[in-house]
Amino acid sequence: MAEAEEQETGSLEESTDESEEEESEEEPKLKYERLSNGVTEILQKDAASCMTVHDKFLALGTHYGKVYLLDVQGNITQKFDVGQSCYSGPALAIPRRNIVAMVMASPVKINQVSLDESGEHMGVCAEDGKVQVFGLYSGEEFHETFDCPIKIIAVHPHFVRSSCKQFVTGGKKLLLFERSWMSRWKSSVLHEGEGNIRSVKWRGHLIAWANNMGVKIFDITSKQRITNVPRDDISLRPDMYPCSLCWKDNVTLIIGWGTSVKICSVKERHASEMRDLPSRYVEIVSQFETEFYISGLAPLCDQLVVLSYVKEVSEKTEREYCARPRLDIIQPLSETCEEISSDALTVRGFQENECRDYHLEYSEGESLFYIVSPRDVVVAKERDQDDHIDWLLEKKKYEEALMAAEISQKNIKRHKILDIGLAYINHLVARGEYDIAARKCQKILGKNAALWEYEVYKFKEIGQLKAISPYLPRGDPVLKPLIYEMILHEFLESDYEGFATLIREWPGDLYNNSVIVQAVRDHLKKDSQNRTLLKTLAELYTYDKNYGNALEIYLTLRHKDVFQLIHKHNLFSSIKDKIVLLMDFDSEKAVDMLLDNEDKISIKKVVEELEDRPELQHVYLHKLFKRDHHKGQRYHEKQISLYAEFDRPNLLPFLRDSIHCPLEKALEICQQRNFVEETVYLLSRMGNSRSALKMIMEELHDVDKAIEFAKEQDDAELWEDLILYSIDKPPFITGLLNNIGTHVDPILLIHRIKEGMEIPNLRDSLVKILQDYNLQILLREGCKKILVADSLSLLKKMHRTQMKGILVDEENICESCLSPILPSDAAKPFSMVVFHCRHMFHKECLPVPSMTSPAQFCNICSAKHRGPGSAILEMKK
């Protein structure tokens, strides 16, 4: 018990269950604070017995018979000792704007305080039987003294209305008081005979109360009791474990008694089912058991807040003792419930409290829950976003806290995103996660240059400048040059590659370029051949527009960026004497660059520079020829030797495509080098086909190539030479028999074959000749059939066309007299002749046909030729 007394004096922040792990990852749903100031002062000398809550103020009843009105912070702003005269005079003229305190003289415990929804009328009942109802801002009053303790009182929610001047009280029976039109109060008994009335809750037209036997609901409109919900555990004393009632809305009643919770829904009965039954009935929509005894209930959206009285058994003494009460949030289901959160509360004097000593009151408008005990009043609030962030920071979940703050930045009041972010960075640094901390700086520090510089110096102190270097701002904002130089010096001392990366990625205007150039030169004195430093120095020279030095370093290093440097800064005038170096480095890129910029470096200049390097000269001229066959025509003679020496596969294509190449020179070179294919092409191109064919037969011994050559030339003399050369060579005869059937009559070849000569595959060759012949015959017959069919089709089409009618109207004229073909008077008879050529004549304008030539012809068309237009179509009317 000594330990419990120490807990009593502790802060309410210790109210979570110590039996659970302190480092639990489950966030609490509610936060707690004590009503201090006036409440503390009251409860030092008195004990709370009941309390009711309004959105504007609180009303607290005590064991010594006092009722206090308090503000929502628990402060007593004013006190009145009303006594027996509390119902008249200025004492009741309470200003609406002020929250006041009032003391009602009564020597015994206040059992219940009730307020209407407007907060203008209050009802009080006490253990000595006194009942009082009065207006806080008016002189209205009712007071009565009964001969038994009055346990409960409930004022009509809309008591301020003249038609709703009603309240109920309960002792051994439940009485309804109503004020008549003559301002007289009359009472009626709603229920009696089942023991003391323990609890009453009034909502709308429904009154719910609990007695020793169960819970009843009364419809004030129809004056009917509509249900009776019996008590489950009758072994519990109803005075020690009272029933807790709570209206969630106008038709949903929540009942908590012992360890049982029932959620009841009031529904309208169908007219056909009424008979003698009430117009409404109650359905229990959810029912479940809890682990502890219920001291209070309150709704929270679709969940429930349950105040529980807990008894535990000591492991040492094995005696039962009162433990701290619990406030649980549960999700009701049809036959069970799901626990959302559970907190054990350290209220003052919990060791001596019983279940009946605790009450749970709530403010619907603000989701505030008041846990009332004799010596303490604790307020539970839903945690807001600031509280959520507090919990995340406490659990060192800085990233989640930062995200929550960013999402709800308009709603948070106590936290700043920047402060959370800085705490997150410090946390990461403390854990040694320097790279993550540096990366987060980008998002957290944003454009705050001062904070950036502060963080950089922090990283310098712990020797982690390299970690933050990739994330430094490079544009908006821009830090002091000293910051960037400090980081570059750090890399230069220990990491040349990292230094080179920063120089490549950072704009050159972030730091003093000359300072860094001098630092690199100093390091090159120790390691003059270091390629990384040399390349980086070239980049620094480029930033400084010292392109000459940069180009020199790139060429020395044979670095690929030399071409980009030349293009970007137009350095072609600087490379005219460095063409060989560029070609040695990368001939393809160099040639492309030179050809793309002929206007800056002429072809003549390039060829001259490469005179001593013919292999490079060939690469350049070959690429030039591929782009344009005529630009380098003056060098085509030179190219013959270059192709012959360095690129024979492209020599023949060059000879075929070039029209500026001297053929005699080319033939001389090819004959000297014994290039047969090229020589054959040149001989053929120069008109010496017979020599070319002879070379194919004698040098290449390739009958197929010879036949192909003869086909290309299509010269009868060449075929004769080919046959004469092949006549004594059986393999050649076979090739001829297989290939010349469509160009030369095979009989001419067969007649010349000597008797007795063995011809390889002669039978197959003869069969192929016959097949080719049959194929030709079939093709001719097929073509003839197609031609005849097409001719017939066209003739029929012409006939159909000529048989069609021809339109004649006023616009047509006689081709002879040039007057309109149709008479102006359509009633007069007329005749005309229309030829198929569309020429029209008056019949009288045509010459009379002779006996030798009775047919008529179009004078216009017959002067040119006789054809289809000569036929006529005669029209008469």
Image (tube, grey):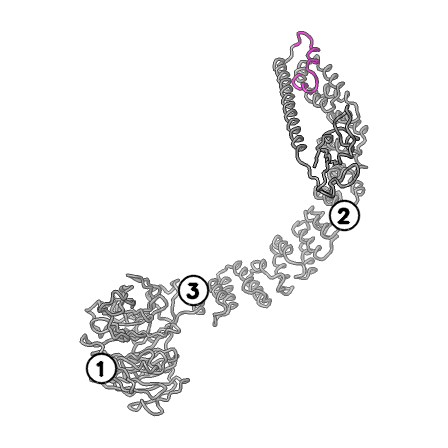
Disc nearer the start of the sequence (1/2): 1
Q: Which residue is mark 1?
A: 149
Is disc 2 surrounded by few (<14), some (14 to 19) or many (20+) residues within 10 Å? Answer: some
Q: Which residue is mark 3?
A: 395
Instruction: Say whether marks 1 and 2 touch (CB < 8 Å).
Output: no
Residue span colored magenta: 737-757
Disc nearer the start of the sequence (1/3): 1
Label at residue 266: none
Question: Label 3 sits on what residue type?
Answer: Lys
Q: CA distance from mark 3 to mark 2?
A: 66 Å
Please say whether residue 241 is one of the residues in the magenta stretch: no
**Residue 8, above or below 86:** above
Find residue 614 and report its image quarter: top right
- Give the image location of residue 552, x and y in percent: 73, 50
- Give the image location of residue 532, x and y in percent: 65, 51
Q: Secondary structure at mark 2?
A: loop
Is disc 3 surrounded by few (<14), some (14 to 19) or many (20+) residues within 10 Å? Answer: some
Find residue 208 and report its image quarter: bottom left
Specify whether 589 is left or right of 401.
right
- Give the image location of residue 366, x and y in percent: 40, 73
Find residue 74 and report its image quarter: bottom left
Q: Secondary structure at mark 3?
A: loop
Q: Which residue is mark 2?
A: 575
Q: Nearer the viewer, residue 177 or 2?
A: 177
Question: Label 1 sits on what residue type?
Answer: Pro
| Rendered-image quadrant of the C terminus | top right
Disc nearer the start of the sequence (3/2): 3
Q: Nearer the viewer, residue 623 or 759?
A: 759
Specify whether 118 is left or right of 789.
left
Q: Secondary structure at mark 1?
A: loop
